[in-house]
Amino acid sequence: MNHVVNPGLPLFEGAEWDYDKLWKAYDAIERVGLKEMGLDVYTNQIEVITSEQMLDAYASTGMPIFYKHWSFGKHFAQEEVMYRKGFRSLAYEIVINSNPCISYIMEENTMTMQALVMAHAAFGHNHFFKNNYLFRQWTDADGILDYLDFAKGYIAQCEERYGLSRVERVLDAAHALMSHGVFTAPRRRSLDLRMEQKRERERQAHHEAMYNDLWRTLPAKPASPAAASADRERRRALLGLPQENILYFLEKSAPRLEGWQCEILRIVRNVAQYFYPQRQTKVMNEGCATYVHYKIMSRLHETGKLTDGSWMEFLHSHTSVIMQPEFDDPRFGGFNPYALGFAMMQDLERISMEPTEEDRIWFPDIAGSRDPMNVLRDAWANYRDESFILQCLSPALIRKFKIFRVHDDASRPELQVASIHDERGYRDVRRHLARQYDVAELHPDIQVVDVDMSGDRKLMLEYRARDGILLEESDTRAVLQHLADLWGYEVVLEEIDKETGGRLKKHVVGPRSIIGV
Amino acid sequence: MNIIDRRLNPKGKSLANRQRFLRRVKDQVRRAVREASGQRSIKDIDAGGDITIKPGGVAEPSLRRASQGGIRDHVVPGNKEFVTGDRIKRPEGGGGGRGRQASQDGDGEDEFRFMLSREEFLDLFLEDLELPDLIKRKLASTESYAWTRAGYSVTGSPANLNLVRTTRNSLARRIALKRPKPGELQDLIREIEALENSGKDPERLEDLRGQLELLRRRSMAIPYIDPMDVRYNRFQQVPKPVARAVMFCLMDVSGSMTEHMKDLAKRFFMLLYLFLGKHYKNVEVVFIRHTHVAQEVDEDTFFHSTETGGTVVSTALEEMVKVVKDRYPPDEWNIYAAQASDGDNTPGDNSRTAALLTEGILPLCQYYAYVEVGADPDTQSGTYAMGSRDTDLWRLYSRLRDEGAPLAMKQVRHRRDIYPVLRELFAKDAQAQGATP
């Protein structure tokens, strides 16, 4: 659909919005986004919702379709109180990584806000979803809504057939383990039958080629302690151990779970996997969207399509979004992903357009390239937060934010400032800030290491503690209880120091009310 | 691009989640609700509102690293005076800003607050209560018919058209009569066009045109939807039995009733009234208050106006008998009564009260509940406890009950007792229990 827009005339005036204005604004934004910035997006679908529906969407992790569980009701109740009492305002938009890409906008927003939201979500986030390697690798934008629809129907069916409380038990347990229901490295695609046969033939050919009758004459090895360990190795290989994805392991190997319970575990872990890239790209994703909306809105203002009033309104919300409180500010809650992301994107643009001597040393390949959009598109496609910060955070930005690192060793009475924003500190600050965004770093490394299938079926897990940081005691016991109930037998979790291999702590939990049969 | 207006979509998509959540915390919420009812003023006793519960039953644990201990690095913005190597005193509750962040989603003992709607509040508040002995004495005549689905019919109003049945019939008929499908016609037309354009094979062209003509005629002759396909949902009226009940609320508002006692009595009736209104659409309520004279009043006067005077219980009973005679013939109505008093009565009136009760009122009633309100033992510790000396009415009613009259009696001295007493009097299974104090 094309609307003729007179150049130089504002797209809209005043706060009220209607569909005609939305269309006009969308077309103008699209022109800037696709033609001038070269964005590449999924087809957009923009849905207008009320604030109550926005609260609904909040409660079910932003997805338009989701299965039912009390925890979403709890979140809704919490958000509702916060919102009704005026402690917190609602997000202006929610955007879903699907194809078509669905953005929700609220009816309460002014027209300026709607334009901002469309630029931010329908072009910024959308471009990121479609192009970032993590999303391409991990999530299936075409299928997610269908899958969630299936999940919702499946769980509702289970509730009907097996009763609310039994389904709730499984979901509770699965949610507790949700953070350990993801594969952190891309997996091999499962082979189809033809590939399987081909590989089998290849193996045979290899054996024949390698055959040597002499091998037969070698004396047999005496039975030794090594046999026991070989047995253990064989068992571990059979069960695919060690396994970091606990939900996957349970789904495939838990001895007492019924089929439908395994399927629910599978649903929960698929949902977790779908959200996995989002956790790793907060700064980049928001940075990309914020940069895109800023760029588009300023282009619209430059070409006279946005009135000065709208521009001021836009700047007001833009600046409050990218506000970064300092560490001693009561509002401080870590780095604001919008602020850091936006600043880094702008910084890349600056480096590419007007590099300083310092930038030429630090970023020789992009400094002065005079093609910022190319640099940015490349960054958006190929990095996640950790690698992006590690490689693209410039000294200029470290100075601007006055970033410093404090070393906190619990065995010492005082904290120590390890490095600050100076020549000696840039690399150190940058490396450690990147580490804060590394999921492998934040996410406790817990693996299923062994299970005694022929004996008492005890399930063994290991947590490899880095820097002597143990697991949160009470939560861990609660989760292990869920795990033991799912597994049906005793569960042992050992906390082991990663560097020394020393055993720090051991949790043993037996099943209390077994979920399976 | 597509803009879709979802504002008219059904609301409350997370209602099912909310119900699951409430079910999960039911015990806690129920307790909170009942405590809240003791503290509220009479006017907003039935409003919904904030409920605070412990997060215990609704914690969502996860495997995560402890927020304390070990070796950590905090990288934060906004350095003002530090240089490399500076030592900083460890701030309370973790180091740097991350500590604060971690404690936010830590296992904090914070209470969990959320809002209940009025319906949810009352549901929890009044669950498991019912009027005892509700007998369907008489089916009320006219308006109590309900429509129920009763299969399908070939006639009806367009609003009741059953699309599924209709199209199913139509489809079956079309298949049976071999009505050509639109696709077949399209293919044929396309083929004819192709032949016309190419000019080859005139014979086949002629043949195809004949076929097309035939198919066209057939699809004209066989309609897509024939009147004989059409089916309507059929409804029929089913008489719905309605038991009619009336509840008499009798309250002593004489001078001997202190403000505290009046408050207790009013609270009791307020809860009773809420309970009746919630569970019985067809229950009428009659409010009678008395001093040495009795009068029937409306709800508002009953709860909110004050009055003083002597105490003659029999006047209220007389008034009740009169009202029953005028408006509620006992063979058509289930009659219930609840009386609240401090137990005082003019001594000469006791025998008359007893006579009225045993002969006039109790035979009419399904259930008669007596609630005696007393001084607050917490604030008036000096006065003797009420149990030490039974009041006139209490002794009278006890005697009647022992003689087998259907009477339930309870004493209430404190706000917090009211709710349990109401529950005991009207608990679903506990009629036997309700008859003993």
Image (cartoon, grey):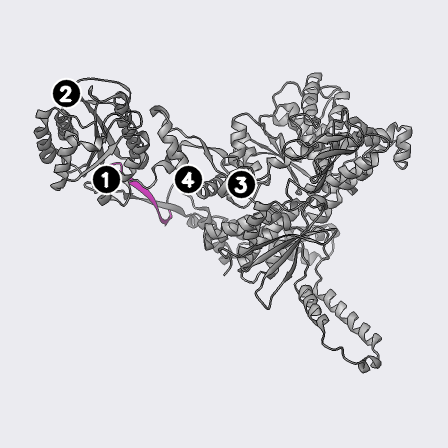
Q: Are marks 3 and 4 on the same chain?
A: no
Question: Counting residues from the N terminus, which is met first, the one under dot 2 or under dot 4?
Answer: 4
Looking at the rendered structure, the kind of residue marked 1 is Ala
Residue pointed to by mark 4 = B159
**Which mark's residue is nearer the viewer, 1 or 2?**
2
Q: Is residue B142 magenta?
A: yes
From the viewer's perspective, is B291 left or right of A458?
left
Residue pointed to by mark 3 = A72
Q: Position of residue A180 (x, y in %)?
A: 64, 50
| Element marked by disc 4 | helix
Q: Where is residue A266 in the image (x, y as percent from the top left)?
A: 60, 54
Q: Position of residue B336 (x, y in %)?
A: 20, 35
Q: Are marks 2 and 4 in contact (CB under 8 Å)?
A: no
Q: Does the magenta stretch include residue A80?
A: no
Above or below residue B387? Residue A224 is below
Q: Give the residue drawn at x 53%, y 61%.
A: A256
Looking at the rendered structure, the kind of residue marked 2 is His
The image's mark for residue B243 is: 1
Chain on which label 3 sits: A
| Residue situated in front as seen by the camera: A236 or A55 | A236
Looking at the rendered structure, the kind of residue marked 4 is Ala
Above or below residue A455? Residue B323 is above
Q: How far apart are marks 1 and 2 (CA)?
A: 34 Å
